[in-house]
Amino acid sequence: MAQHWIATGPGGLDVFSFEEYDVPPPGQGEVTIAVRAAGMNPADAKHVARGSAADFPKAIGYEVAGVVSAVGPGTEIGSGPVAVGDEVLAFRIGGGWATEVTVAARDVFAKPASLSFGEAANLLLAGTTASEMLHVTGVGEGDTILVHGASGAVGVSVLQQAALLGARVVGTASEGSSDVVARYGGVPVTYGDGLEQRVREAAPDGVVAALDCVGTDEAVDVSLALVANRDRIVTIAAAERAKREDVRAIAGAMPASQAYRDSVRGELVRLAGEGRLEVPVARRFPLADALEATELLMGQHPGGKLVLEP
């Protein structure tokens, strides 16, 4: 019998439960995936903590990679024809922290052979978020932009995608993570007192846009001080502050964000398959150890993506 992690109600890790379940067979427009790797994202725990009681019990995990074990009648996946045994990745789904899961075929794409299952399972939530941040702020060739939290998962994807657009990035990080920013083509600056002046020194001609991946008051304050056009400031972590300051906040649950992120999945898979978009993986955990992995993810900087492996 298959196993998966569910949240029994809103709350912390105490509401997470590892349970056996019957995987429904795929109907038309669905496939079943034998999971080889499940991606981990802060949203996995945050959406449990902030959920309403009516949303539970709720299966956890938004992205996976694995092998197709069953295909519904007359079904193709997001990238085209599919057969049992094909290696795939999937996002946006529900219940990915599992040994096997049945999902909508439109959310499934052929896994490039060049990607490990762990890399593929962690590509699209961070990648589509980063792509939308660049899209809504109109970043293009020759722009110099500021990215707060540039060493995190979304920030690293922003660094790489901005480079593909021909943009220059000044990226904030801790002193210990500055090498990550530099490795992916950014100019690192440490956050903390004096950040605004350090950014001005790193970008003497100014920054035209600011992308906030951390949500601190410092990040918003410095963005407002440096970017004249508030339409070119975006945050994924400071929604309330954004509302007060009349700057843009985006989130995967917003219809416009969901539509955009869904539209770029295939392109991001292609770029990753060509080696133009990397997914740094820090650690792998057995699926049964998801609570330990989540504590690491939420409590410190893991230095890359975390993977759950059945």
Image (tube, rainbow, N blue to C red):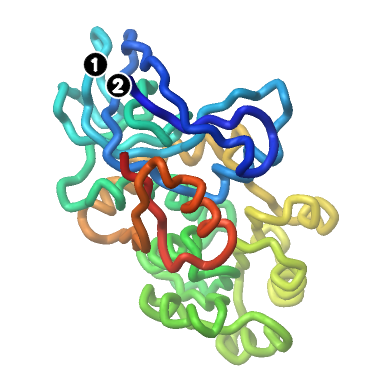
Residue 113 appears left or right of 59: left
Q: Which residue occupies the foreground of this view, 141 or 305?
A: 305
Q: Residue at x 71, y 88 (%)?
A: 194
Residue type at mark 1: give it.
Val
In the rendered image, the quadrant that contains the N terminus is: top left
Asked if residue 126 can be seen in this view, the reply is yes
- Looking at the rendered structure, the number of numbered marks drawn on it comes to 2
Query: What number is the disc on residue 275?
Result: none
How many residues crowd mark 2 within 10 Å: few (<14), some (14–19), many (20+)? many
List the residue tagged with mark 2: 32
Q: Position of residue 139 (x, y in %)?
A: 51, 62
**Is label 1 in contact with label 2 (beta carbons under 8 Å)?**
yes
Residue 67 appears left or right of 65: left
In the rendered image, the quadrant that contains the C terminus is: top left
Residue 52 appears left or right of 150: right
Q: Is residue 228 above or below residue 213?
A: below
Q: Which residue occupies the foreground of this view, 58 or 144?
A: 58
Asked if residue 162 can be seen in this view, the reply is no
List the residue tagged with mark 1: 71
Q: Position of residue 259 (x, y in %)?
A: 51, 34
Q: Which residue occupies the foreground of this view, 31 or 168?
A: 31
For this orientation, the residue located farthest to the right is 244
Quadrant in the picture for residue 157: bottom left
Q: Is residue 142 above or below residue 34?
A: below
Q: Residue at x 36, y 21 (%)?
A: 102
Q: Residue at x 40, y 41 (%)?
A: 288
For this orientation, the residue located farthest to the bottom is 201
Residue type at mark 2: give it.
Thr
Numbered disc 2: secondary structure: strand
